[in-house]
Image (tube, rainbow, N blue to C red):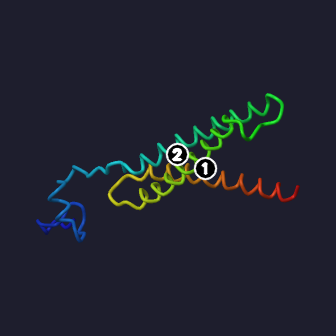
């Protein structure tokens, strides 16, 4: 700030300094809001992750009980549909996380968390499917 210039911006001489100063006087900073889309992405990641974890634990307990797992059992069909639904929601959360990170004038923490967690879920499931295909082809 130039002491000789009474019209100089206290925030530095930027292109939009005067506009910024008119809205937010010196000492009163502008606080960014959280992105609603980022929060939704994060919540989807938590719900999808919890659902997948619960289904995988239920499948492990069912397999540990002994005997063959019947693929036509309604319980198994419901678990399979639950996994597919969780993957679909996680993919939607991944897209929302990308959109949230690209938004201007919003905090990005929930968008980054949602993007990271949903991406981990989608890539983890893709890796497990790829391993199953490799093992199935080798057998």
Q: Nearer the viewer, residue 70 or 118?
A: 70
Question: The C terminus lies in which quarter of the figure?
Answer: bottom right
Where does residue 38 sit, x and y in percent of width and height?
42, 50
Where does residue 89 sit, x and y in percent of width and height?
52, 49
Determine the image quadrant of residue 14.
bottom left
Q: Nearer the viewer, residue 63 or 41?
A: 63
Question: The N terminus lies in which quarter of the figure?
Answer: bottom left
Q: Residue at x 19, y 64 (%)?
A: 9
Q: Is residue 110 above or below residue 23?
A: above
Q: In the visual, does 74 lie left or right of 86?
A: right
In the drawing, what numbered circle is on residue 3? Answer: none
In the drawing, what numbered circle is on residue 121? Answer: 1
What kind of element bears circle 2?
Answer: helix
Q: Is residue 7 above or below residue 119?
A: below
Q: In the visual, does 130 lie left or right of 54?
A: right
Residue, far top: 65
Question: Of label 2 and label 1, which has the lower sequence position?
Answer: 2
Whether pointer 2 and pointer 1 mark residues with C-beta atoms closer than 8 Å, the reply is: yes
In the drawing, what numbered circle is on residue 45? Answer: 2
Q: In the visual, does 104 lie left or right of 93?
A: left
Determine the image quadrant of residue 136.
bottom right
Residues packed near mark 1 inside 10 Å, few (<14), some (14 to 19) or many (20 plus) = many
Q: Nearer the viewer, residue 45 or 116?
A: 45
What kind of element bears circle 1?
Answer: helix
Residues packed near mark 2 inside 10 Å, few (<14), some (14 to 19) or many (20 plus) = many
């Amino acid at each position: 700030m130039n002491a000789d210039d009474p019209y100089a911006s206290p925030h530095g001489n930027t292109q939009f300094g005067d506009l910024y100063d008119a809205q937010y006087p010196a000492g009163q900073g502008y606080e960014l809001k959280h992105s609603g889309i980022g929060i939704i992405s994060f919540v989807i990641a938590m719900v999808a992750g919890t659902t997948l974890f619960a289904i995988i634990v239920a499948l492990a307990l069912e397999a540990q009980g002994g005997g063959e797992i019947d693929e036509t059992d309604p319980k198994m069909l419901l678990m399979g549909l639950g996994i597919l639904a969780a993957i679909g929601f996680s993919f939607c959360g991944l897209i929302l996380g990308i959109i949230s990170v690209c938004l201007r004038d919003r905090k990005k923490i929930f968008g980054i968390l949602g993007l990271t967690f949903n991406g981990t879920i989608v890539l983890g499931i893709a890796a497990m499917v790829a391993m199953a295909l490799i093992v199935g082809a080798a057998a």
